[in-house]
Amino acid sequence: MRVAPVWAVLAVVCGGQFLVVLDISVVNVALPSIRADLGLGETGLQWVVSAYALTYACLLLLGGRIGDLFGRERTFLFGLGLFTAASLAGGLAQGPWMLVAARTLQGIGGAVLAPTTLSILTTYFPEGAQRTRAIGTWTAVGAGGGAAGGLVGGVLTDYLSWRWVLLINVPIGVLLLMGAALCLPVRRGGPARRLDISGTVLVTAGVAALAYGITMSESHGGTSGHTLLPVVLGLLALVLFIRVESRTAEPLVPLGLFRLRSVSVANMVLFAVGAATFAIWYFLSLYMQNVLHYSPVRTGLCFLPHTVSVIVGSKLAPWLMDRVDGRLIGATGGLLAVGGMLWQSTLTAHGTFVGSILGPGVLMMMGVGLLMTPVTAAATSGVPMSEQGVVSGLLNTASQLSGALGLTILATAAANRISSFQGGADDAGEALVPGYALAFRIGAVFLLTGTALIALLPKWVPREP
C-alpha cells in the first residue's frame, strides 16, 4: 500500500468537504433567479435548499458507517462521483421537480462523502496537536465553503446563469476524483458486517416526517392535523430507532458511544449551533436582494468578510488550544457569535453595509470559527479507529440535521411574522424585515444554548505527537 504525503491527503479530503458545504449555501444567492426561471413559490423555493440539506442530514449516519465497513477511501470516491453526477443533472434541470430530485441525489452523494472526509483525517493524523491542526484546516475549509457560497453563487448567477451554481461542481468534482485516485490508498474497511437497514429507514423517516410537519405549520397552523400528525409520527419513528439500536447486534449507531462525554456533549453543542448558523446565509441573501436590492454579485461580495472571518477563527483556534483550555476558546467563540447574531437582528429596511452586514457578520463568523474546532477535536478524541466513521457521521448529522430543521423553524417563524406585517408596510421590503429580524433573534437563543453546553465537555489538554 502506497503512502501519500499528508499534505496531499489533507488537500484532497478538504477539497471534498469544501465542495459539499459550498453546495449548501451556493444556491441561496441564486434563489430569486431560480424562482423566476422555474416558476417556484416560496414553499417550493425552500425545498430547493431543504431537499439537499434534509437528505444529506438523514443519511450521514449511514454514510459514516459505510466508510467504516467498506473502506473510507472507496466510500469517498463513490460519494464524490454521485455528487458530481447529480450536480450535472441539477444544472440541466428543466422543471422544479427535476431540480428538487437532483438536489436530493446531491444530498445522498454528500451524505456518503462528508463523514469520510473527517474520518480519513482522524486515521491519517495521530491524536494530539497534529490532528488538532488538521481538524482546524478541515473546519476552516468547511466553514469557508459555506461563507464563500454567497460570493461564488452571486458571480455565477449574475454573469452566467443560476444553472452554473450547480454545473461548476462538475469540473471541480472531476479534478478531486483524479486527485483522490492518486493520493488515497484504497484500503479495506472493518470486518464484514451487515448494514443496519432498519435503523437507517427509521431515522430517515423520522427526521423527514418531523421536518415536513414543521413546514406544514406555516400554511396550516401549529395545531392542525397536517402539522401534528407528521410531527408525532416522526418522533415515534425516532423513539423506535433508539429502541432498535439498543437491541441490534450491529447497529447503525452504537449507543455506547454516547457514554463518552466528549461525543454526547459535542453532538448537543453542534445541534444547537447548527440550528442557528445554517440559516445565516439563507436570510442574509434574501435580505440583501429583496430588501436592500443588491445584485447577486454584490450580495456575494458582501459575504467575503464572513468567509475571511470564519477561516481566521478556525485557524486561530488550534494555536490558542496549545495554550488555553479548549472549552474556554469554544465558549468565547460562542459568545461572540451570539453578540453578532443579536446585532444582525437589528437590521432595517434602509440598512447599510457596515452596520447591517459587515459588523455583525464578522463578529458572528469569527465566533463560529473559534467554536467549531475545539468542539470537533474533543468529539473525535478517545474514539476507537473502527468507530471514527460513525462518530464523524454523528457530528455532521448533528450540525446538518439541526441546520435543516432550524431553517424550517426559522423560515416558518419569519413567514408568519411577515404575513402579519404585509398589510401595514409601505413597501414589500419593509414587510420582510420583521420576519428576518425574528429569525436572527431565535437563532441567537439556539447559539446561546450551545455555548452553555460547552462547559460540560471534558477539559482539553493539548498533547504533542
Image: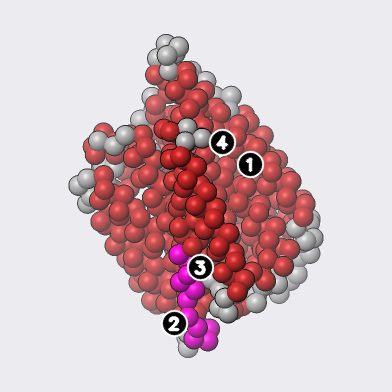
Mark 4 is surrounded, within 10 Å at the Cα level, by few (under 14), some (14 to 19) or many (20 or more) other residues, namely: many
Q: Is residue 322 left or right of residue 222?
A: right
Which of the two marks, 4 or 3, is nearer to us in this view?
A: 3
Mark 3 is surrounded, within 10 Å at the Cα level, by few (under 14), some (14 to 19) or many (20 or more) other residues, namely: many
**Residue under pointer 4:** 361
- Which dot marks residue 214? none
**Residue under pointer 2:** 186
**Do residues under tags 4 and 1 come within 8 Å of each other at their CB atoms?**
no
Please name the amino acid that badge 1 sits on. Answer: Phe
Q: Disc 3 and disc 2: Cα gap in Å?
A: 28 Å
Q: Earlier in the sequence, mark 1 or mark 3?
A: 3
Q: Is residue 211 visible?
A: no
Q: Earlier in the sequence, mark 3 or mark 2?
A: 2
Q: Earlier in the sequence, mark 4 or mark 3?
A: 3
Which of the two marks, 3 or 2, is nearer to us in this view?
A: 3
Seen at 57% across and 76% down, the residue is 248
Q: Is residue 360 above or below residue 319?
A: above
Q: Disc 1 and disc 3: Cα gap in Å?
A: 28 Å
Quadrant of the rendering where the C terminus is positioned: bottom right
Question: Residue 92 appears at what percent x and percent y?
Answer: 22, 51
Region in magenta:
189-201
Residue 108 appears in which quarter of the rendering? Answer: bottom left
| Total numbered labels | 4
**Do residues under tags 1 and 2 come within 8 Å of each other at their CB atoms?**
no
Which of the two marks, 4 or 1, is nearer to us in this view?
A: 1
Q: Disc 1 and disc 2: Cα gap in Å?
A: 41 Å
- Which dot marks residue 446? 1
Question: Residue 450 appears at what percent x and percent y?
Answer: 67, 47
Please name the amino acid that badge 3 sits on. Answer: Gly
Please name the amino acid that badge 4 sits on. Answer: Gly
Q: Secondary structure at mark 4?
A: helix
Q: Earlier in the sequence, mark 4 or mark 1?
A: 4
